[in-house]
Image (cartoon, rainbow, N blue to C red):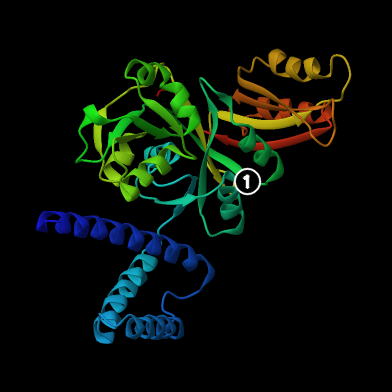
Amino acid sequence: MEISDLREKIDRIDFELLKLIQTRMEIALKTKKFKADVVDSKREEEVLNRVVSHSKVLGLMSPEFTEHLFSKIMEESKQLQAKGYRLVGFQGEHGAFSEVAARKYDLELVYIPCVEFADVFEGVEEGYLDLGIVPVENSLGGAITQVNELLIETPLKIISEVKIPVHHYLLTLPETDYREIRVVYSHPQALTQCRNFLTRNHLEAQPYYDTAGAARMLSMERPKATAAIASELCGEIYDLEIIKENIEDHEENKTRFLVLSKCDLDEPGTKCSIIFSAAHRAGSLFAVLKIFAEAGINLTRIESMPNREDPGNYYFFLDFEGDVRDENIKQVLAAVVQHTIMYKFLGCYKEELSI
């Protein structure tokens, strides 16, 4: 082992320390939602006593250094809490395409990773996240079933949509020779969307739970002759090198995301979303769709999903052009209520026309 090897290890540890501190700050911002004041002297004293005690057990660092270090971390945490940042939750690790969409929506937000889609919904409902962003449909994979189920079950409102092209990047460790790459990790859907590239280059596809998770694993575990397929943002976050960009088989791969809030958007919109169920008899769905046709309202999306609690019946997800404040739209929705056995208005928001 040479000094360069030791310095490389130190660099990696520094990188991991920075990410861990970032995660601590994100959690601190979430805790701010549950307390009235930024300053909590009792809690700060508890933290310092605990870390100083651990420092004494470890033995190498002095208690004074540990206390100073964590005092500075908590000071920065309090300053961030005082700024009143708005938090948006997304499913996946940092660098996920949902975070890419969240950054496109608003660069002033703080982006909070969540393990599951349900965690995003719960975080917004409980109030420790101001907003949530979730994918609702992909141009190749279709509707995201779990998200649609959660839209039925929860009271959250849609306040915006974000559409992004899904471009996949081949990422490796900076020290990796691209000619030595043999194995590629990513989410199964991403591996499928890059099948031609992988086959052409004789690369072994290894499924992983998340595209960004694969990039994070590569950065932390540093396996030899290995790459990950993920977003360009993952390359920046995890200090990985882009070997090849836009390796997806289909250029038209796009995903539509919904921005969720506890409250309706208090401004005019150009698109509305609803969920409904019609009676299980001939012509019931046609009767609902006829209302929109006769009113001259353009439908932009219609999806169906079986009702698990009522086999044989379906939920229908409908997007249409218009502002819920318009009298024509109000009358149409009032008529829809009369022709359905279940109806839920999801929100009125501005349609994103271009990608």
Outermost left residue: 3
- Which residue is at a point 33% across and 80% down the rendered structure image? 58
The residue located at (21%, 57%) in the rendering is 9
- Three-letter code for the amino acid on which mark 1 is drawn: Leu
Picture quadrant of residue 56: bottom left
- Residue 335 seen in this snapshot: yes
Q: Position of residue 51 (x, y in %)?
A: 37, 80
* Image location (x, y in percent) of residue 131: 51, 49
Q: Is residue 308 left or right of residue 179?
A: right
User: Is 73 above or below relative to 169?
Assistant: below
Q: Position of residue 177 (x, y in %)?
A: 20, 33
Tell me the SS state at disc 1: loop
- Residue 316 position, x and y percent, is 72, 26
Q: Nearer the viewer, residue 194 or 233?
A: 194
Query: Is residue 352 something one can see in this rendering?
Result: no
Which quadrant does the N terminus fall into?
Answer: bottom left
* Residue identified by numbered label 1: 156
Residue at image point 28% right, 26% down = 245
Q: Residues within 10 Å of mark 1 (few under 14, many from 20)?
A: many
Q: How many marks?
A: 1
Q: Is residue 287 left or right of residue 171?
A: right
